[in-house]
């Protein structure tokens, strides 16, 4: 089963492939953005910066795919402007994840 999203004016079937999930404060140690450094800087930066940072782990070889994004009920969710990635994060719980949106025929 796949989900549909609107891409370029058409409803397209997609799956979501997991790229990365960070949940420990030390996982964010290398982050530097407009909001600062580390985990606090990550959550205080723009969603584009968050996506760009997490996308560095995208090697396009994900073995985990699902029909729906893995975002939790209390997560903040954002799709990048190219509709290639879906970001989900929860500041209070200190985690963030990125999935690739993959069109299927």
Image (cartoon, rainbow, N blue to C red):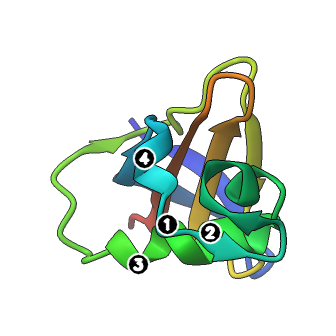
Query: Label for residue 54?
Result: 1
Query: From the viewer's perspective, is the residue at label 4 or at label 3 nearer?
Result: 4
Estimate the x, y position of residue 28 in percent, counting from the top left.
Answer: 50, 55
Within 10 angstroms of label 1, few (less than 14), some, or many (20 or more) residues? many
82 with respect to 21 (left or right): right
| Disc on the earlier residue, 4 or 3 | 4
* Left or right relative to 85: residue 27: left
Q: Name the residue under label 4.
A: 26
Gap between marks 2 and 3 measured at Cα? 9 Å
Q: What element carries label 3?
A: helix
Gap in angstroms between the C-alphas marked 3 and 1: 5 Å
> Which element is circle 4 on?
helix
In the structure shown, which secondary structural element does the residue marked by tag 2 occupy?
A: helix
Which residue was labeled with disc 3? 56
Can you tell which of label 4 and label 2 is closer to the viewer? 4
Q: Which of marks 1 and 4 is in front?
A: 4
Q: Check contact, mark 2 vs mark 1: CB within 8 A.
A: yes
């Amino acid at each position: 089963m796949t989900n549909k999203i609107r891409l370029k004016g058409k409803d397209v079937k997609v799956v979501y492939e997991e790229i990365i999930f960070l949940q420990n404060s030390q996982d964010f140690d290398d982050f530097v953005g407009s909001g600062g450094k580390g985990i606090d800087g990550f959550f205080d930066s723009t969603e584009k910066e968050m996506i760009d940072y997490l996308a560095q782990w995208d090697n396009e070889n994900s073995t985990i795919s699902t029909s729906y994004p893995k975002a939790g009920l209390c997560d903040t969710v954002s799709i990048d402007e190219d509709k290639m990635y879906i970001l989900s994060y929860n500041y209070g719980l200190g985690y963030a994840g990125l999935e690739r949106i993959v069109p299927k025929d």
